[in-house]
Amino acid sequence: MNKMDDKDKAAEEAEWSKEAGDKGEFLDDGRMWPYVVPVDAFGEHIFGEYTDKLKEGVVVEYLMRDYDDLMENNVKCMWLAKIVKIAGYRLLLRWVGADEEGDDRYDFWVNIGSRILHSVG
């Protein structure tokens, strides 16, 4: 078995880095999307009990931690957000009240398993 010298190793790493960069370009312009398998294509998957109940348009509670230092007596600030889009384990949310048509300034992504999301009530 031959050992790589530093020059060969550097050349291989540069080639690998170049290939990785090329794949990033495919992801950025959407050419890889036909090869991405959606989460719900699998019969059993992590967070299955959540994904079955979450649909676009459902309203959830979002724990807003920005105001924790202003709250007294351990009071939590909860905001309502509507699910705009579901992409795998990520939810695109929009604040309730900021839902004008075409206004996506306040949209944000959250992981479906995040502890800051709760069902309403």
Image (tube, rainbow, N blue to C red):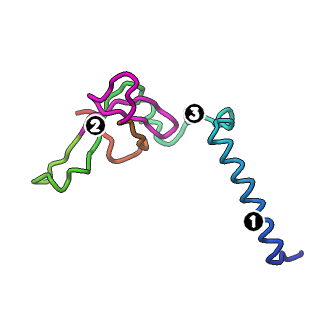
Query: Where in the figure is residue 18, as x and y percent of width and height?
Result: 74, 56
Q: Tell me the quadrant of the picture where the C terminus can be found.
A: top left
Callout 1: SS: helix
Highlighted range, magenta: 79-105
| Left-right relation of 108 to 30 | left
Residue 94: quadrant of the picture: top left
Question: For mark 3, what is the residue?
Answer: 43
Mark pair 3, 2: CA separation = 28 Å
Say if the magenta span includes residue 21. Answer: no
The answer to whether 20 is drawn above or below residue 103 in the figure is below
Give the distance between the C-alpha atoms of the residues marked 3 and 1, in whole angstroms.
38 Å
Position of residue 102 measured from the top left corner of the image (x, y, whole percent): 40, 24
Q: Position of residue 26 (x, y in %)?
A: 68, 42
Q: Would you name the residue on which mark 2 appears?
A: 61
Q: Amino acid at mark 3?
A: Gly
Extreme residue toward the left, this view? 73
- The answer to whether the residues at label 2 and label 1 have Cβ atoms under 8 Å apart is no
Q: Mark 1 — residue?
A: 13
Q: Residue at x 49, y 40 (%)?
A: 89
Three-letter amino acid code of the residue under disc 2 = Glu
Task: Compare residues 73 and 109 and report the one nearer the observer.
Answer: 109
User: Can you say which quadrant of the picture contains the N terminus?
Assistant: bottom right
Nearer the observer, 88 or 11: 11
Query: Within 10 Å of the Cα at label 1, are there few (<14), some (14-19), or many (20+) other Cα atoms?
Result: few
Which SS class for mark 2? strand
